[in-house]
């Protein structure tokens, strides 16, 4: 038995695959964190883009309405010719109300 070498303890002293086995869950965790960051970034940028498009769409709808209101406002508060052949004129609504009050008070006296 002198040809046999004794290896000391009776168990294996190598680490085996401990480092590799530890790297697998760590790399899986890092991959999961990376996916979460990418997903959060994508949803945030998409929600900002959608909000921007909605605001721009609302402004595009608001502009014709504002032009219509401006035209109506100018027709209610400005003098103008409605029909030149018939001699019809347009007067501001405030002036028309004053004339109606004068006319009504003159009729009641």
Image (spheres, helix red, strand yellow):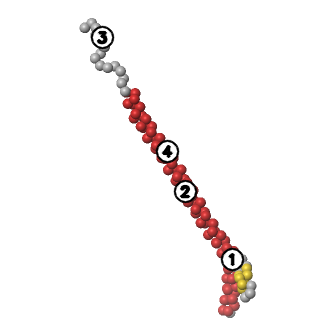
Q: Which of disc 1 and disc 4 is earlier in sequence?
A: 4
Task: Judge whether residue 109 can be spotted in this image.
Answer: yes
Between disc 3 and disc 2, the foreground one is 3
Mark 3 or mark 4: which is in front? 3
Q: Is residue 5 above or below residue 105?
A: above
Where residue 14 is drawn, which disc sits there? none
Say whether marks 1 and 2 touch (CB < 8 Å): no
Closest to the camera, between mark 1 and mark 3, is 3
First in sequence: mark 4 vs mark 2? 4
N-terminal of the pair, mark 1 or mark 3, is 3
The image shows residue 24, relative to residue 97, as above or below, that is above
Dots 3 and 2: beta carbons under 8 Å?
A: no
Q: Position of residue 17 (x, y in %)?
A: 37, 27
Residue corresponding to mark 2: 51
Marks 4 and 1: which is nearer the front? 4
The residue that disc 1 covers is 75
Q: Which residue is mark 4?
A: 38
Residue under the image location 58 percent in, 63 percent down: 58
Q: Nearer the viewer, mark 1 or mark 2?
A: 2
Front residue of 99 and 76: 76
How far apart are the two marked residues, 4 and 2, measured between alpha carbons?
20 Å
- Disc 1/disc 3 C-alpha distance (Å): 113 Å
Mark number displayed over residue 5:
3
Mark 1–mark 2 Cα distance, whole angstroms, equals 36 Å
């Amino acid at each position: 038995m002198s040809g046999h070498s004794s290896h000391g303890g009776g168990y294996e002293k190598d680490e085996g695959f401990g480092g590799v086995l530890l790297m697998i869950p760590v790399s899986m965790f890092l991959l999961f964190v990376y996916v979460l960051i990418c997903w959060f970034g994508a949803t945030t940028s998409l929600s900002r883009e959608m909000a921007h498009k909605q605001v721009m769409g609302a402004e595009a709808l608001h502009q014709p309405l504002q032009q219509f209101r401006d035209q109506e406002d100018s027709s209610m508060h400005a003098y103008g010719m409605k029909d030149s052949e018939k001699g019809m004129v347009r007067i501001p609504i405030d002036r028309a109300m004053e004339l109606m009050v004068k006319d009504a008070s003159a009729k009641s006296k």
